[in-house]
Amino acid sequence: MTDSVRLEADYILETYLPPEQAAEIIAGEQSSGTFVAVPGETPELKARAAARVESLETIATYNAIPALDGRYPTDATMPLHRVKMTLSWPIGTVGVSLPNLMATVAGNLFELACVTGLKIVDIRFPTPYFQKYQGPGFGIDGTRELCGVQSGPIIGTIIKPSVGLTADQTASLVQELVAGGIDFIKDDELQSDSSVCPFDNRVDRVMRVINDAAERTGKKTMYAFNLTGDMDEMRRRHDKLVLAEATCLMVSLNSVGMAGFVALRSFSQLPIHAHRNGWGYLTRHRSLGWSYVAWQKLWRLAGADHMHVNGVDNKFSEDNVSVLKSARECLTPMSEDMPCLVMPVFSSGQTVRQAHATYSGLQSDDLIVTAGGGIVAHPKGPAAGVQALRDAYQAAISGESLDSASKQSEVLKLALGSSV
Amino acid sequence: MTDSVRLEADYILETYLPPEQAAEIIAGEQSSGTFVAVPGETPELKARAAARVESLETIATYNAIPALDGRYPTDATMPLHRVKMTLSWPIGTVGVSLPNLMATVAGNLFELACVTGLKIVDIRFPTPYFQKYQGPGFGIDGTRELCGVQSGPIIGTIIKPSVGLTADQTASLVQELVAGGIDFIKDDELQSDSSVCPFDNRVDRVMRVINDAAERTGKKTMYAFNLTGDMDEMRRRHDKLVLAEATCLMVSLNSVGMAGFVALRSFSQLPIHAHRNGWGYLTRHRSLGWSYVAWQKLWRLAGADHMHVNGVDNKFSEDNVSVLKSARECLTPMSEDMPCLVMPVFSSGQTVRQAHATYSGLQSDDLIVTAGGGIVAHPKGPAAGVQALRDAYQAAISGESLDSASKQSEVLKLALGSSV
């Protein structure tokens, strides 16, 4: 078995054991071994099936209260090691399966008693995974084509209030935004199907507005309808979207899960706007869970076209370094044959003021910016808000300062002078 | 809208803001509101759509470094509040949908800047959820009937080594265990389908052993085959299991996700043995993520029949109080009409020594115990190992001590005298 068919994952491990010992325990637990020696785990079987510790690099040895509770004294500091650990598995035993890969690289290991902290920070898939899974069906180019935006950021917004508007009220809002020349609109992740705003009604009302405008102007705004639900519901809603000539669907990744997502990708005729809500519980403690780099690879390979990355100067708890690292990762090829590039989606308090930091951090204009207040609260209305955002990004791309650009752009100047 | 159609969730929140203010921010973000006031969020809309803070109870106010990183000074202690918070949502906007419920009760809120810690500790579903979702198809009674175990714990084991055995080697191990009178066997969660041990081969070889034995003895061991995979694979494997007259399937919940799981339940003709691997990253920090009480309710309502709860004196990091609380919860009705009771599955280093603590903590004999070394390493072999576990639990149920029971049971005495 060659290394091209081994699966690899990197971790930041914290442990009170000598790192070599902890790594061996983890590799054993996540492959042929178990807590105790079992007679069947022969040297031949281990050679074929065992996970391997590929590398182990101590980052720090320090005295601290362990980050995670466990069966060790947590009321006193103890010597701990923080190490970068790489494990690999033969796919002869893991198989070629994203769901089963998750049980392997991110299963029981987080609960092991020797683990006082563990974060999975990267995953490298062997070739057969790229042969089995579909990756993005539309990606960057397909999205640009459907939006009619050949270059520059795709300027978008989110329907707010998050929930509570009826289908007709949603369509009225969409009318105003479409008239403003917006490229992209999305449902809030809390809005899928409800008696207040049934999915089908929303699609009918909103697509009538969008299709009418497209017929008149030639520009068709992309609307990502949140079809999150059970499999049969998602299938039915997808078909409804196709019939209504919608150009995007949205789904909540953590709500639907990997098996449902792969199935959705298999029949989807539309770009998949992937929402990461719930991401906080997977990542927010620095010593536990998933890094975005590792996590987003799963969904890109499985078929996401747009991935949420939060935004520069967001209103959540994440810092800009982390946001921009996530966004750059979406534009980093996963393999030569199948790069799986996806549009990073910036959101949360986005205005003209973040354009320069976003562009300089990303070094690409392949992005979707969704701004709420940043567009609708522009003193001259949504059309001016959209144009101001475009002008701000154009300035960033041209290497011109916001101040300087605002001398040429009245709408940008107004945006800068306003509270949004 | 009456309270019977509101969804409720309880949280333990840690925040540096006055708790009332933090709770309002969270309730707003998770319903009609957003970071800033938007014109459409009228009083009428709020009355219809907003989440409500039902109760807020301060547990402690203290000075500490916040548990989670965020945009506040974490190098110094600051005054924090730990509060129990209950929020409720009208299903008129949430809809009746387990996936969308997840985005509502466990979506963006974990990332909010005012949150320095957040754990979801319980969920209460309104009646329409019990009308839409199926709950366990077999539950406790159905599992007992298929196993032929009318009362007392169902004694089981896990195939070890975890991965690396071929289908034939697995079947040989099963032969030995079945001859020992075991009630239940499961695949390891790392074993689903691979070139070393293809799913179909394993099913064929194992079920031949089990069906032959059942024909001879009348006792049919339940084997939970891990069919975790993509939807089309799970469907095909399920049908294979039915054809082979298997009596149980196993699935990794975090690998498959909610939409896939609900779909699996909709066509499954077999009890669903639900594996929680990955649970560590959802729960292991005390101030982040999910409690088992909240989490397991989702899967029971969606249709799990057996839920993993770890084990007393396990080899992982979880303490016994937490294990037993999880297990009792599986036997606590979710509603009067639809209790959704499921078999708690104890595992991880289980032997005769944990029988009394397990039974006294659970106060029920409705459980599955899966012991590895505790069965196969018995000095007189697996049959004696199975009987020793049965005798230990019988003693616990009868209120007899292990020592006293071992005077009547040679196999129990041998187990106690051995290292297992």
Image (cartoon, coloured by chain):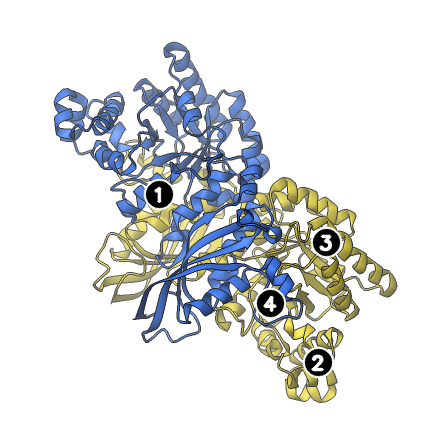
Chain colours: A yellow, B blue
User: Spatial distance from mark 3 to mark 4, Cα to Cα?
Assistant: 24 Å
Left or right: A165 with respect to B171? right
Residue carrying label 3: A202
Q: Quadrant of residue A84?
A: bottom left
| Type of amino acid under label 1 | Ser
Does residue A369 lie above or below B279 as drawn?
A: below
User: Spatial distance from mark 3 to mark 1, Cα to Cα?
Assistant: 41 Å
Is mark 2 in CB contact (under 8 Å) with mark 1?
A: no
Q: Chain of mark 4?
A: A
Q: Secondary structure at mark 4?
A: strand
For the residue pair B112 and B281, the one nearer the viewer reads as B112
| Picture quarter with the C terminus of chain B | top left
Residue carrying label 1: B326
Task: Tell me what residue is drawn at x 36 percent, y 67 percent.
Answer: B81
Asked whether residue B247 is in view, the answer is yes
N-term-proximal mark, 3 vs 2? 3
Q: Residues within 10 Å of mark 4 (few under 14, many from 20)?
A: many
Residue carrying label 2: A379
Does residue B382 lie above or below B354 as drawn?
A: above
Left or right: A245 with respect to A185? right
Q: Chain of mark 1?
A: B
Q: Secondary structure at mark 1?
A: helix
Task: Tell me what residue is drawn at x 71 percent, y 64 percent.
Answer: A184
Residue carrying label 4: A346
Q: Chain of mark 3?
A: A
| Type of amino acid under label 3 | Arg
Is mark 3 in CB contact (under 8 Å) with mark 1?
A: no
Asked whether residue A293 is in view, the answer is no
Q: Secondary structure at mark 2?
A: loop
For the residue pair A273 and A213, the one nearer the viewer reads as A213
